[in-house]
Image (spheres, rainbow, N blue to C red):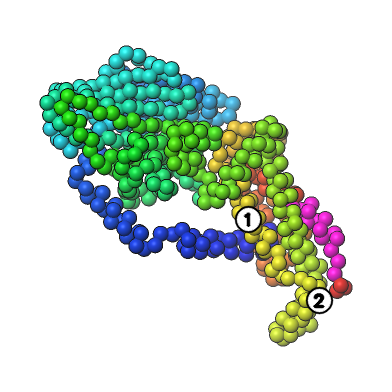
Amino acid sequence: MDTKNVIAAISLSAAVIILYSLFFQPDPATIKQNLAEQNKIENNEDTPSLDKNENFSKLSRADALKENDRIQFENESVVGSISLKGAAIDDLTFKEYNVELNKNEKIILLNPRNVEDGYLIESGFVSTNKNIDIPDASTVWEITGNKRLTNNNPVKLAWSNSQGITFEKHISLDDQFLFTVKEKIINSSDKSYNFYSYGQIIRNEIPEISGFYILHEGFLSVLDDQLIEEDYDDIQDKKFTQIAQEGFVAISDKFWVTSVIPPKGKEFKTTFDYKNKFRANYISTKGIEVKANSSIEEKIQIIVAAKRVNVIDGYAENLDINKFDLAIDWGFMYFITKPLFFVLDYFFKLLGNYGLAIIAVTICIRLAFFPLANFSFKSMGKMKLLAPEMARLKELHKDDKMKLQQAMMALYKKEKVNPMSGCLPILVQIPVFFALYKVLFVTIEMRHMPFYGWIHDLSDRDPTSLFNVFGLIPWDPPSFLLIGAWPIIMGITMWIQQKLNPTPPDPIQAKIFMFFPVFLTVILAPFPAGLVIYWSFNNIFTMIQQYIVQRKMTIKTT
């Protein structure tokens, strides 16, 4: 890595910030209007609150699942149960995904509310009329008909109050991750009532998160074409509220998403908050009147999914959920990142190995930028060849900076060298390389996928360590000493590549850059092996191209 790369990275970051502020950041008037609307909603007394005083004793997961009667559900992708108490979807396991490679323990995402890491979805109706009994988290529902939910057999739950009103839930499940819930109110009384539909995701505590700035884990929503991402700690400090005409509400993990899609064509209020538990919910802003001896029905959709690209894109298209594909964190360079994934997936289907697919994509990127890279390498090659002459001029004019500058400019003109000419090609390439880095980091498709040799999971770190001689010594080093073979290969390729670049004129700067490969080796050691393999092969292909270009370089000054 050379000084130009650092300058280019800083320049690109500054350019992104400036362009965002100029073209995408809302103007102050819009921000003020949005705040006014938000305050209006928060203070709207016509919309009932979802706040409830709930006191539950904490249980083990096994005891919590036995505490209440349940409806079992299962299809090809998930297995779990729905509690008849509260009619909450609070038990879900992914059948196709293991917690660890080569072990049979499956990923459990949802847990009952009285488990320490409780995580569940509930839905229903509320009302401003405090004289009506409405089902809540303590209500025990009855099953009508089919007692097991599958993708071929829906279930029906019912509960009636003493005022002649019956609440029903018709729940169906597709063959993957979609629950469709039809909420029905049958009013057999001689009075009319207003109800507000809602859906809510509850999570008791912050899960284990990756903590990398390039990945969002936490509250997620698209509201009227606007992507909303809020971290857990932000919501602990201040709740978020906004109205919308369409969208979805979700909590997103690195590889999993739990989402609720409100009824189509009806305005709703979305709230993210924390009151001893995290909540992401929506509630309709306009009540639905249920007249005497009549009924109404609302349909919501619940998606609890592994974030496979074809699955998420399929639901976005088939259910017409605007921007639901953003449940996968493609980042602000979406227009580059997502196409890169499809290229990577194409090579995987062609070659049968994601490691080989990564190498193939790296080659394609190098070929695409071959002319630009050549231009950059020629500039750096000439600068390297000019280094002895530059040193001579500095010694000759060490007491006269003006003459030194004039002599250097004359040398550049004579050799047709522009010291900054290598920056533009690097600037153009950085977004593409970052986008590929993002794809390899956030997509589940690479999870538990093997490469060759000792790499059995490209989404996990290299399991070997220099400090036990890569397994030859029978000792398990602590995690901070797990500097594997691939990170070391990457560091070596970076060091060799650095030797091909011009030596910085400043001795201190030169020492810093000499240390840089060691620094990055340690920093990138915990990263997924797929990323490290990508950087290693990218360095190798860069070195080959750079070496060939510099071998052909000549200058007039000798």
Residue 499, x across and y down, in percent: 76, 59
| Kind of residue indicated by mark 1 | Ile
**Mark closer to the chain start, 2 or 1:** 2
Q: Are marks 2 and 1 in contact (CB under 8 Å)?
A: no
Above or below, comparing residue 545 to residue 440 in the picture: below
Q: Quadrant of the C terminus?
A: bottom right
Is residue 544 magenta-colored? Answer: yes
Residue 258 relative to residue 344: left or right: left
Give the residues in magenta.
542-555
Judging depth in this view, the residue of 130 and 381 nearest the camera is 130
Q: Amino acid at mark 2?
A: Lys
Q: Which residue has dot 2 on it? A: 414
Q: Which residue is mark 1?
A: 430
SS label for mark 2: helix
Q: Is residue 397 visible?
A: yes
Q: Is residue 154 left or right of residue 255?
A: left
Expressed as whole percent of the image width and height from the top left, the position of residue 88 reads 33, 28
In the image, residue 12 lies at what x, y percent?
A: 58, 61
